[in-house]
Each structure stands twice: as structure tokens, then as C-alpha cells.
Amino acid sequence: MKIVGNIIWFILIGIWSWIGWVLIGLIFCITIIGIPFGKQCFKIAKLSVLPFGKDVDVNFNAHPIANILWLIIFGWGFALGYLISALVYCITIIGIPFGIQSFKLAKLSLLPFGAIIK
């Protein structure tokens, strides 16, 4: 299921999500202050390409100030987008695995600093 899910995800969702996160990360990396945020975008891009078979451990205490800044400025919007898409995917039985992956990406996009992708 993991291989088939990743192939379908990559074709329909993953490539576009990856392109978006990489572009956002590059925009952040233009300034010195934005480089830590850009690195987190690249982390999310890495997961958004092939999310099946991976797990996310969020550690808020690793970087609380950076997580709060991210959450207030960017994270809530990104997470809301993934939550809405997850709910849309979960309407059908076939879309439930994709909805689960969107919930995983919502968790990572909400608090990416200190998060570990396993």
C-alpha cells in the first residue's frame, strides 16, 4: 500500500505540493532572517513528496519561540489548507489514506521547528 499510495500521491498531489514548498522556501532564503523558515519549508517539501510510510514527531519545546512565530505568521494558514484538503479527501472511502497524509502534513506545517520525520 505504501508504494502504491506514494505513486498516486506523487502524481496527483506530491509534485505540486513539493514545487510550492520549495518556492516558498527559496523566497524565505532570500533574506538572512528568513533562512531558518526556508529550511523548515524544505523539510515540509521533503515530506510532501512521498508521505506514505513516514511519521512526524513534533517537539514544540525544541524551539518554542520559532514555533510561536511560525504558528502566528504562517503555520495556521498552511495547516488550515491541509486540514480542509484532508476533510475533503476523507469524504470518500478511497480518499481516506490521502486524508491521513494531509493530517500528517497539517501537523508538520503547524509546528515544523524541532519536528522529526521518521
Image (spheres, rainbow, N blue to C red):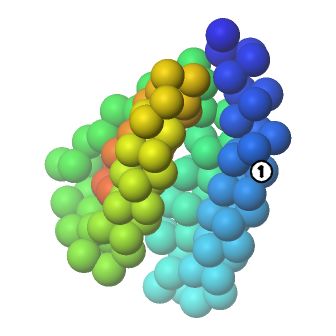
Q: Position of residue 41 (x, y in %)?
A: 55, 62
Q: Residue furthest front?
A: 92
Q: Which amino acid, mark 1?
A: Ile
Residue 81 in the image: above or below residue 34: above
Q: Is residue 85 left or right of residue 73?
A: right
Mark yes or no: residue 8 visible. Answer: yes
Residue at position x 34%, y 33% from top?
Answer: 57
Quarter of the rendering containing residue 25: bottom right
Q: How many marks?
A: 1
- Element class at badge 1: helix
Residue most extreme to the top:
1
Q: Is residue 30 left or right of residue 58?
A: right
Quarter of the picture containing the N terminus is top right
| Residue 99 x %, y % | 47, 35
Query: Eyeballing the image, is 9 above or below 24?
Result: above
The residue lying at 35 percent from left, 61 percent from top is 80
| x 81%, y 41%: residue | 11
Whether 94 is drawn above or below 36: the answer is: above
Between 62 and 105, the residue placed more toward the observer is: 105
Judging depth in this view, the residue of 90 and 55 nearest the camera is: 90
Q: Is residue 52 left or right of residue 102?
A: right
Residue 75 visible here: no
Which residue is the site of mark 1?
Answer: 15
Q: How many neighbours does mark 1 have within 10 angstroms: few (below 14), some (14-19), or many (20 or more)?
A: some
Q: Position of residue 117 (x, y in %)?
A: 49, 33
Q: Residue furthest bottom?
A: 31
> Which quadrant would residue 5 be assigned to in this image?
top right
Residue at 48% x, 70% y: name it: 37
Horizontal side of 2 relative to 81 (left or right) equals right
Q: Say if 6 sits above or below 18 in the image.
A: above
